[in-house]
C-alpha cells in the first residue's frame, strides 16, 4: 500500500447523504456538495479512491461498472477516443466484484486504493456541486445494471476520495 509523507485529505461520500435533488435518484447518479476552498489549499493533487457497495446479483459480469465524476474536470487524465485526438475523461476507475453469497450470486462491488491508477489533478476541485455516476463499459456508457431477474442499479455505496497534495500553489 502507498504511504504518503505529503498532506492528505479524505472526502467521504455516501449515497444516503447525496444532495436533496438526487436523493431519490437511483444510486447510479448522485450529486454531492463540498466546499473545496474551506477544506483544501490550491495545488497539484494525486487522487485515488476506495469504494464499497451493498450486494448486487452478478453471474457472468457481462458489463463492468465504471465510476465517473465531473470532479476530475481539471485533471490530466486522458483517453484516446480517436486516433491522434486526446481529451479529458471523467472516469475515476473501475469496480471489482467481491463475492458475498456464492449460492445466490450476490456480490458487493469495491475498489481499494491500489485497484486503479491514481489521477493527477492540476489543482484541487473547484466545482463544489459535482456528480458521481456508476455506469457500464458500453459505448456510450449507460447506468450499470446487475444480472438479477429484474435488473437493479448499483447498491447503496460509500466512496472515499483520497487527495494527496503534491505541490501547493502559493
Image (cartoon, rainbow, N blue to C red):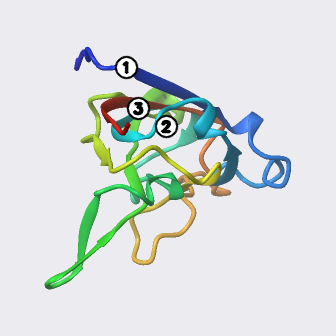
27, 91: nearer the viewer: 91
Identify the residue under disc 1. Answer: 7
Mark pair 1, 3: CA separation: 8 Å
Question: Where 9 sits versus 36, above or below?
Answer: above
Identify the residue under disc 2. Answer: 105
Question: Where 70 sits versus 34, above or below?
Answer: below
Looking at the image, which residue is at 63% across and 32% down? 38
Regarding mark 1 in the picture, which secondary structure is present there?
Answer: loop
Identify the residue under disc 3. Answer: 163
Looking at the image, which residue is at 41% across and 71% down? 138
Q: Quadrant of the C terminus?
A: top left
Report if the CB atoms under discs 2 and 1 are less than 8 Å apart: no
Earlier residue among tags 1 and 3: 1
Specify whether residue 61 is in view: no
Report if the CB atoms under discs 2 and 3 are less than 8 Å apart: no
Earlier residue among tags 2 and 1: 1
Q: Quadrant of residue 111?
A: top left
- The location of residue 116, given as percent across then percent down, is 28, 40
Report if the CB atoms under discs 1 and 3 are less than 8 Å apart: no
Amino acid at each position: 500500500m502507498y504511504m504518503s509523507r505529503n498532506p492528505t485529505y479524505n472526502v467521504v461520500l455516501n449515497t444516503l447523504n447525496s444532495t436533496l435533488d438526487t436523493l431519490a435518484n437511483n444510486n447510479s447518479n448522485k450529486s454531492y456538495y463540498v466546499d473545496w476552498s474551506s477544506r483544501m489549499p490550491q495545488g497539484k493533487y494525486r487522487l485515488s479512491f476506495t469504494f464499497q457497495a451493498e450486494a448486487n446479483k452478478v453471474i457472468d459480469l457481462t458489463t463492468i461498472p465504471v465510476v465517473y465524476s465531473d470532479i476530475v474536470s481539471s485533471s490530466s487524465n486522458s483517453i484516446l477516443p480517436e486516433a491522434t485526438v486526446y481529451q479529458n475523461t471523467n472516469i475515476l476507475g473501475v469496480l471489482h466484484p467481491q463475492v458475498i453469497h456464492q449460492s445466490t450470486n450476490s456480490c458487493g462491488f469495491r475498489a481499494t486504493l491500489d485497484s486503479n491508477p491514481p489521477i493527477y489533478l492540476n489543482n484541487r476541485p473547484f466545482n463544489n456541486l459535482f456528480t458521481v455516476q456508476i455506469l457500464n463499459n458500453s459505448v456510450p456508457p449507460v447506468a450499470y445494471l446487475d444480472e438479477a431477474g429484474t435488473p437493479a442499479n448499483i447498491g447503496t455505496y460509500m466512496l472515499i476520495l483520497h487527495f494527496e497534495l503534491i505541490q501547493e500553489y502559493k
